[in-house]
Image: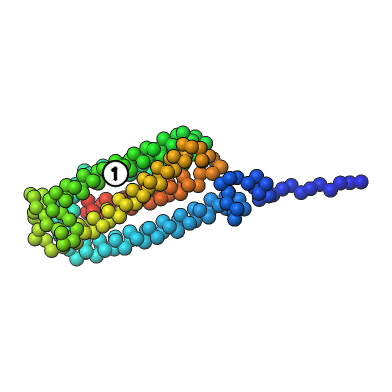
Amino acid sequence: MATETAPAPTDTEVEQDHHPSHLEHHFVSSEQQFDSAKLGMWIFLITEVLLFSGMFVAYAVYRQWHPETFAAASGTLNQLMGTVNTVVLLTSSLTVALAIHCIKQDKVKRCFYYLLGTLGLAGAFMVVKYFEYTAKFKHGVFPGNAFDPHGAHYEHLAGMEAAPQFFSIYFVMTGIHGIHVLVGMVVIGVIAIMAWRGWFNSEWYTPVELTGLYWHLVDIVWIFLYPLLYLV
């Protein structure tokens, strides 16, 4: 008497039989969970783009109204510091990309070290920005009504009508970007600790990749801020 052969289990059934600890109960597979998380991150990043887009529009409008003043005010910014920070952030994008590449190959320690390098570069960015801010505050360059420039490098801005608007836009845009850098540092630090403790591997590295997406956005925003504020 012939016996019936059971059909081969599907990928979904295999996934359900071998339920990974990282897989939430409402997902049928790790791939579905990863795609959902990535979609959610992209939606969040779109809202961030909209936030900065509004500020870019404000910059463009005021620059159109006061091109000479904005050019003069831009000339007082420290281009060397801006360039150094641009190089620092671009390098940090490389290190976070290498961290993702390593975790996909189960090179956990290398992933940790690249995340640590990214964290260090982010810290260097904030240190440079601290010195840049304090140099302006020392000479009375504040946003809004507190704008009272003095010193040979800034005193010519005192009689320019739209100079306070330029520095208000400058401090708001770079300040919000700096907050994003600080948030990224906290997240990268947590992810680095989790990587060191062996939470991630080639089968599950979703938090590492989502952190990398966020950090790339932070870098892209700065790539637009740098030429608009420092070079144009």
Q: Residue at x 81, y 47 (%)?
A: 5
* Residue extending furthest toward the right: 1
Please state which of residues 165 and 64 is positioned toward the viewer in this rendering.
165
User: Residue 142 in the image: x percent, y percent?
Assistant: 17, 56
Image position of 16 (left or right of 175): right
Find residue 120 and report its horizontal and vertical position in percent: 34, 39
Residue in the image at 21% along x and 44% along y? 131
60 vs 225: above or below: below
- Which quadrant would residue 167 be assigned to in this image? bottom left
* Residue 92 x/y as whole percent: 36, 42
Give the quadrant of the C terminus: bottom left
Q: Secondary structure at mark 1?
A: helix
Q: Is residue 75 visible?
A: no
Residue tagged 1: 125
Q: Eyeballing the image, is 196 above or below 23?
A: above
Front residue of this view, candidates 168 and 102: 168
* Front in this rendered view, residue 107 or 131: 131
Q: Amino acid at mark 1?
A: Phe
In the rendered image, residue 191, in percent from the top left (x then y), is placed at 44, 43
**Which quadrant of the figure has residue 44?**
bottom left
Left or right, 117 with reference to 19: left
Badge 1 crowding class, 10 Å Cα cut-off, few under 14, some 14 to 19, many 20 or more, is many
Visible residue check, residue 57: yes
Q: Residue at x 24, y 43 (%)?
A: 128
Q: Viewer-proximal residue, 64 or 93?
A: 93
Residue 118 as seen in the image, left or right of residue 225 = right
Give the colour scheme of this rendering: rainbow
